[in-house]
Amino acid sequence: MSSADWATKDFYAVLGVPKDADASAIKKAYRKLARENHPDSHPDDAKRLDRFKEVAEAYDVVGDKAKRKEYDDLREQVASGGFGGGFGGGAGGGFPGGFGGGYGRGGTSGQGFPGADQGFDISDLFGGMFGGGAAGGGAGRRTRAAQPRRGADLETETTIAFADSVEGTTLKLRLSSDAPCTTCRGTGGKPGTKPHVCPTCEGAGSVASVSGGFMMNEPCPQCHGRQLVYDEPCPTCHGTGRGVSDRTVSARIPAGVKDGQKIRLKGKGTAGENGGPAGDLMVTVHVRSHAVFARKGDNLTVEVPITFDEAVLGAEVKVPTLGGAPVTLKVAPGTPSGRTMRVRGRGVHRKDNTRGDLLVTVEVQVPGAPTTAQREAAEAFRAASDGADPRAALFASAGTGA
C-alpha cells in the first residue's frame, strides 16, 4: 500500500466499525470478517482472498493501539493540509506545495532547504521523524533492523460466583487473539523456502512518498516491514504472517472485586513483535447474585427471619456467614421487624487486609395460617395489651382522628 493509500484509506470502513469504536468492537468485527472470507473456506474465490487480505491489513493498523494512534494522527494531518508550504525548491523542481529538490540529496540551487548545498540529506530529517530511511534510490537507503513492537492489549469478560468475588479466585480463561502464523512463524513464507531482499524497499523495510505536499515513511507494502520476501507465500496465512491463536491463560481475580470491574493482567495480551513485550489483558468481571447474601460497599447483607415470640421476648439466633461457620446473634426483647444489627469482620476483604462487616436485618415472621393454639395465644396477648393502640401517636402527629 502506498503512503497516499495509507493516509486516505478508511480502515474503519473496511471493518465496518465507526471511528470511535473500542478495541473490543474492532476485534469482533475483524474476527467475523476473517471467518467469512478465510481462503480455507473459499479456496477458489479470488475476491474472498482479496477481501481477507484487505481486512487483515486494516486490522493490523487499527487493531494495534500504537499503529491506530499513528494512523488517526496521520489522517487528521492530511485532512488539515499536512506540511503545506513545505520546503523551498531546489534544482530538482520540488514537490507540489512541498519539498524542493526531491527527497534524497538536496538540490544544488541553494534555494532549497537550508544546508542543501552542503550535501544535506533530507532523508536524515524524515528518517528521524518516521523511524526509517527515506532517501531516494538504492544507494541512499539504509537497511535497519526491524524495531521491537509491543503486542496489542486484549479484552475479555468472565462471570464468577458471588463467593469468589468476596474471597478471590484463580480462573482459566480461553482466548482467541491475533498472533504470528504457526506454520511460517510469522515470516509469511512457505516453510522450507528461502527469502531474499525485498525489491520494493531494497531491504529498508519502509518506503517514502509524497501526496499533496505531505511526506511520510511507512512499512513497505510488499514485505510489510520485514525487509525480506518469499517467492512462495505461506499456504496457511497466504503471506500475511499472522493468524488467530487459541490459548488458555491463568487469571488471578483479587478478593473484593466488584461486578463490572476491569482487571488488568500484565503481559497476558498479544505477543510482541521482533522481541517486543506482550500487551496486557483487560478482564471485565461479572458477579452472579447469591441466594442469601448481597453486597453493600465492603459489607455483606443478609435477612434473617425470627418468630413473634423471639422479637417480643428476645432470643439468641444462629446467623449464616459466607464461607464460614454460623455466628450467634443476640436479639434484644422488643426488637421490631426490619432492625439491622452488625457482625464485625465478616464482610468483604479490603486491600489493607481488613474486612467489612455482615449486616443482619431481622424480619418478624407472622404465621399465615395460625393453629388453634397460636390463635388462642394471640387472643391472650391482645387481652393482655389492655386495648393499647400503636397507631394513636401516628394520628396525633398527623392532626387527624383515628
Image (spheres, grey):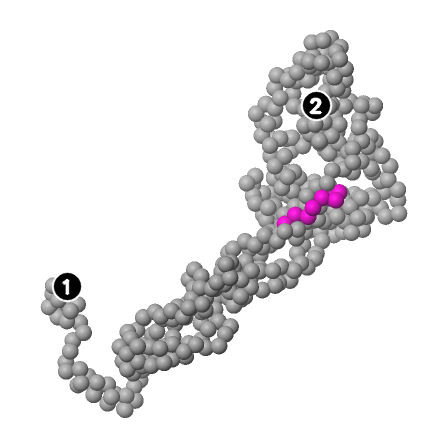
Which region is colored magenta? 273-280
Q: Residue furthest bottom?
A: 373
Q: How many marks?
A: 2
Query: Which residue position is annotated with label 2?
Result: 125
Left or right: residue 272 versus residue 261 is right
Amino acid on which the number 1 mark rests in the picture: Ala
- Compared to residue 335, the image places residue 64 above or below, namely above
Left or right: residue 239 versus residue 29 is right
**Magenta-colored stretch includes residue 13:** no
Residue 279 at least partly seen: yes
Q: Residue at x 29, y 86 (%)?
A: 370
Tell me the quarter of the image containing the N terminus. Answer: top right
Helix, strand or loop at label 2? It is: helix
Q: Residue at x 74, y 30 (%)?
A: 132
Left or right: residue 30 versus residue 21 is right
- Compared to residue 171, the image places residue 120 above or below, namely above
Helix, strand or loop at label 1? It is: helix
Q: Which mark is residue 398?
A: 1
> Between 275 and 30, which is closer to the camera in this rendering?
275
Q: Position of residue 14 (x, y in %)?
A: 64, 40
Prevailing SS of the magenta stretch: loop
Q: Residue at x 76, y 23 (%)?
A: 135
Q: Residue at x 56, y 54 (%)?
A: 263
Q: Position of residue 84 (x, y in %)?
A: 61, 19
Q: Rounded to the nearest whole Å, what is the CA distance between mark 2 and mark 1?
A: 85 Å
Q: Position of residue 306 (x, y in %)?
A: 34, 79
